[in-house]
Image (cartoon, helix red, strand yellow):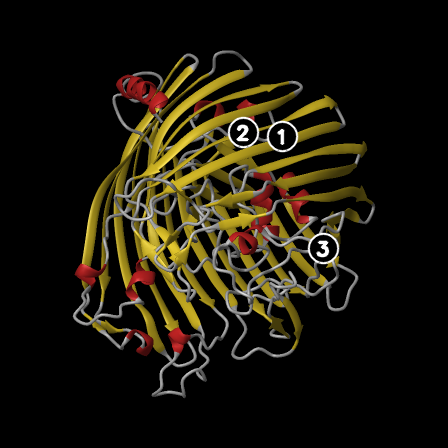
Amino acid sequence: MTTLHPLTRAVALACLAASGHAAIAQTSEAPLSEVVVTATRNSKSVDKIPGAVTVISQRELEAQYLLADDPSAALATYIPGYAPSRQKMSSTGESLRGRGTLILLDGVPQTNPLRGGMREGYVADTAIIERVEVINGASAMQGMGATGGIVNYITKSPKGEGTTHSVNARLSSQLRHDSLDWKTGYTLQHKSGGFDLLAFGSIQQRGLGYDGKGRPLGIESVQGDTMDSEGTDLFLKIGKNFGDQRLQLTVNRFRMEGDGDYKQVPANFASGTPTSSTPGTPVGAPPRNKVETSSLEYRHNDVLGGSFNAQLFKQDFASLYGATNTATFQDVTLAPAGKLFDQSEVVADKYGAKLTYVRPNTVIDGLEFTAGLDYLRDRTKQWLAGTGRTWVPTLDFTSVAPFTQLEYEIGALTVRGGVRHEDAKLNVDTYTTLAAYGSRLVQGGQRAFTKNVKNIGAVYRFSPNWSAFVSSAEGFGLPDVGLVLRAVNRPGQSVASLFDMEPVVTRNNEIGVNWRGALGNVGASFYDSRSKLGTALRINSAGIGQLDRVPTTVRGWEVSGEVRPARTLTAFGSYSRTLGKTAATAGAPMDVALGARSQGPDKLVAGANWQWMPKANLRLQATKLKDRDINIGRSVGTAILEEHFKGYTLVDLAGSVDSPWGKVGLGLENLTDRQYVGYYPQSTSYKDAASYFAGRGRTLSLSLARSF
């Protein structure tokens, strides 16, 4: 974005160093000066951080979960640039500002960039989440994968002294056969003498959903579905304060697995009937997610005049996909052609460390110095669980990344700048591809890269209510290496020659303005996000994906805010417009619009909160997705790029009241019982009768939470 370049150069001269990306947050619950975010590696008041961050509070999350116990639906409601929810276990197409999202749980990475199975949306029970911090736009502050931004789920901690027990229950139904969802959980909180503990356990059972015409929704039997499933979560957080020091252990064990009670009924495109379901037992084991996340954190608030934070973490992730007899899995040595059903599983184990040191007033007053070191070891593979065959060999990735950052505050101006040096290696052993690819022997080897990822920005508070920011931030990710390696079909290939290990480096230039006053707040920003060597996944006529390394550019603008005409009434709204472009091939013109896999439609969210009694609230909201028709007549090889989407508007109603029995909540999702086909299945150019899914019709939810 050429209008930003002079500004960023001026900031660079003023700062004399580069910086990690940060952002401005907005929330409806506190004045701007009281909002603090931690996703920038140090707790920071948002009026001193340049960029665009949204903080979703616990109250806002609770209101959304009254409607649907769906983390991605909450993000789509509160984050302007987040694409619509799939309402499935798979998050394919749920992008942020047209690019990839790095998902964290208390700073621990949950995303699997080496083999993107798109199952990272369900890694913890929503009941343990206190707030969500979202950095919009490219960022390298938390490592690789955040080319579109960061979503950091912050778990709950004990608040008041003493011991508290809490129980919660949720029922959801469409008042049709087998449509009942239920969840119950128990929380123990204790805090005394510098010691605190929070323990949580939950169990959940989800039934079948129905569309606006009363038809059963189609089960996503291969990629995974939240319908007809059961889940559990066990969570423990223990902490101890020692004067200026704190030691904290956090462990979470999450499971979600299909029940396997329904089979698919393929869509009928001629009649416009979407994919449906019928009672039956699918072949193989039901899809599931198994995620275990643990971290040990140490903090010292007085080390050489600054604070030191160290986090050791480990995450074990396994996602099993449903059985299919796709041509890719066939092997005549195991079964006659077309008769072999198999199912894949992505297994990713990560461990690492994050070290951060922050010292204010370094050398001169107002100059804050931050330095740190990140280490990550990620071992990812994809195998066929039914026959034990290797599909993607073990990808052994190691990353060491020191970083430094300077922040200088002078009056109403805050300037930040820093650099992260990424040194990464990927080792792959020799392996043999599946029979469908010719059983090719691929020679293993090592690929490596080093990269300096820079960020810079400034925020100016030019009145008590107004501030403006400008930022230029880089984020980086890797191409989906597993997708390339598993599809080798030529002899004599090696890891060294198969793919370009150069990372996907994305630079996000952004400028914005924020106002906050007694009557409300509003924020607006314009961004220009570019990657010279990006990725584009294209689905050919056989339904097989091909990864092309081509440049991509995403431009967009977002505006959001709220107004409080009365103490008991708040109106809110947001609008986002995203325009992504890429090239058909490397070196070709940038005249291909990004498809639904990468980019959501223009989106308007509007609504109001009414406190109609001292302890009772009512929320009415509407989400409008606009029509989208792109790439008319365009194709690359056998991959058709043309997409069509007919937009729709959904209205929701939710309310809660504090009663003598606890906090009672009621939600009505899709209040008008609108019949619609979701954005991604409606838009994607490769139409599959097994995945043309309608969205949920009117759904009633009741909840009760009580503490004692």
Q: Are marks 2 and 1 in contact (CB under 8 Å)?
A: no
Q: Amino acid at mark 2?
A: Val
Residue 697's disc number: 3
Q: Which residue is mark 2?
A: 35
Where is residue 539? Give x, y as percent: 41, 59
Which sits earlier in the primary sequence, circle 2 or circle 1?
A: 1
Check the picture and name the quadrant holding the N terminus: top left
How many residues crowd mark 3 within 10 Å: few (<14), some (14–19), many (20+)? many
The quarter of the picture where residue 383 lies is bottom left
Q: Is residue 75 left or right of residue 311?
A: right
- Of all residues, the one furthest to the front in this rendering is 633
Amino acid at the residue labelled 3:
Gly
Q: Amino acid at mark 1?
A: Ser
Give the residue at x 20% y 56%: 447
Q: Position of residue 16 (x, y in %)?
A: 25, 21
Indicate whether 78 appears above or below 311.
above
Helix, strand, or loop for circle 2?
loop
Whole-percent x, y for residue 62 in the image: 66, 44
**Would residue 46 be visible to someone looking at this image?**
yes
10 Å neighbourhood of mark 1: few (<14), some, or many (≥20)? Answer: some
Expressed as whole percent of the image width and height from the top left, the position of residue 521 reads 60, 23
Q: Is residue 340 above or below residue 495?
A: below
Say which mark, if any, is on residue 28: 1
Q: Crowding at label 2, few (<14), some or many (≥20) Cα neighbours within 10 Å? A: some
Q: What distance separates the C-alpha of mark 3 from that of mark 1?
A: 30 Å
Q: State which mark lies toward you, 2 or 1.
A: 1
Query: What residue is drawn where x is 33% and y is 74%?
Result: 390
- Residue nearest the viewer, comparing 14 with 472: 472
Marks counted in the figure total 3
- Using residue 259 as the reference point, say whether residue 178 is left or right of it: right
Of tags 3 and 1, the one toward the viewer is 3
Instruction: Give the distance between the C-alpha atoms of the residues marked 3 and 2, in whole angstroms.
Output: 37 Å
